[in-house]
Amino acid sequence: MKLFCTIWMLVFCICDISAQWKSSDYFKEIYKQQDKILSVAVDNHFASNTIVSSFAWNYLRGNYISESEKDDCISNFNNEQIRVGERFKTGISIYKKLGEGPYFFGLEYSENVFYETRVHNDLFSLLFKGNKSFEGKSASLNPMEIKLFHYAAFKAGISKQTDKFSFYCKLAYLGSKNYLDLKSTKGSLYTEPDGRAIDINLNLISVNSKRTSDGFLNFSGSGVQSEFGLDYKFSSSTGLYFELDNLGYIKWNKELVQRKVDTSYHFEGILISGILDSFSLDIKDAEELKSRFIIEQGGLSKRVNLPVLFKSGIYHDLIPDFLRLGLQYQYIQSDYADPLWSGLVDIKLNSKFMLGAEASYGGYGKFNFGFKTGFNLFKLLYAEAYFNSLNSLLTSKEPYTFIGGAVARLAF
């Protein structure tokens, strides 16, 4: 068991350690007539292409993970690398109409987390099954890649809302709270027959930054961001839209720490653990690993572009004011994620209540489906919520996802 802890400790020693469908907003025509709009929103997109739901739930809760759950994950590999990605955003905004309209000006604050990782299937097997199955052969530790952005965004924006055409433009100041970029260029672990010794060949490099305190305005780096979108209705029932988000960068001035692991190491005297069916290494603690393997350099500067997100879609009112169909394409600037295709059906039951269904394929995961709902209360409060991970709830053997969000608007 200490073997996989050793590998994982290497990663953590060196580290020092998600938006989906653009909702068809049926209530916009009502609340855009008001003078001010106050909104609170949360949105999360977490997905994996191989890790099954039952394994993820038990792992996150710290519960016992059965061998069958581990085997279910392994059966999903199919020569694919393990991918996990998340985009999380929560924030508050207020917009005010300029004069008689149709322009609105507003301010926003949001917390944003972008995380993605890609690792070789062998690493999963080592961590959760031990290296008994790799006796006499090598397990690959490459790729092993992690990217993390956590930042606050202070935005100012302007939008125009008409019956036929609408657009928005936002500019933001960004404050970095956490950043990590870890990547391996080579990595393998060879277990000799009978477990008498192992050979680790590993090259890792990471760059990370972390705040020294948790003050609201205490940032380790800063940057700028822009966001654009337009919606054009070219007939009474059909329209299309385009969005470009995360166009910007974050820069750190002498606040980054770089850590390198570049070593080939031979461990002897490896003992077989009968209980865990793995091997044990005589490694004392993380500090010993650091002194053996890790070269650290601080005070570095760097500028990193944010992962740009592009969306486009088309919608059609099959039955005006009752049934709307839509199709969306989404692409994120990432080596880990595939393009994401989504389809949506919205049903407006009356002026106060609507329901919808959604299905999507791609991104960091595979197939997902779910529902959304919205209501209008006294032409004052407008709320929508969606959950697009019903497949993760219905079967424990599907790749785990948690895709959902909600928004509440007060118009006055």
Image (spheres, grey):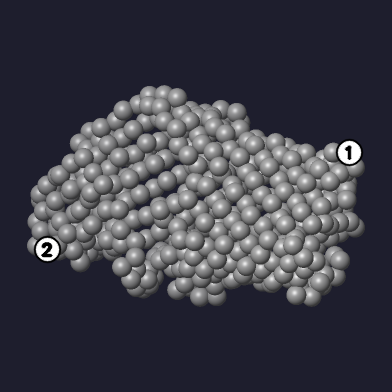
Rendered-image quadrant of the N terminus = bottom left
Identify the image quadrant of residue 182: top left
Position of 38 compared to 371: left or right? right
Label 2 environment density (alpha carbons within 10 Å; few <14, some 14–19, many ≥20): few
Residue 198 visible in the current orientation = yes
Task: Give the residue pinned by disc 2.
Answer: 136
Residue 123 image position (x, y, % from top left): 29, 57
Mark 1: which secondary structure? loop
Task: Give the residue pinned by disc 1.
Answer: 99
Q: Nearer the viewer, residue 124 or 351?
A: 351
> Which residue type carries mark 1?
Gly
Position of 280 compared to 148: left or right? left
Q: Nearer the viewer, residue 336 or 202?
A: 336
Of mark 1 and mark 2, the one earlier in the sequence is 1
In the image, what residue occupies the spot 47% across and 55% down?
85
Q: Nearer the viewer, residue 245 or 388?
A: 245
Q: Nearer the viewer, residue 264 or 348?
A: 348
Residue 276 image position (x, y, % from top left): 25, 62
The answer to whether residue 205 is above or below residue 60 is: above
Mark 2: which secondary structure? loop
> Which residue type carries mark 2?
Gly
- Spatial CA distance of label 1 from label 2 is 76 Å
The answer to whether residue 185 is above or below residue 25 is: above
Q: Are marks 1 and 2 in contact (CB under 8 Å)?
A: no
In the image, what residue occupies the spot 23% across and 49% down?
186
Position of 155 compared to 294: left or right? right
In the image, what residue occupies the spot 11% across and 63% down?
136
> How many numbered badges does the structure rendering display?
2
In the image, what residue occupies the spot 72% across and 63% down?
239
Residue 222 image position (x, y, % from top left): 53, 30
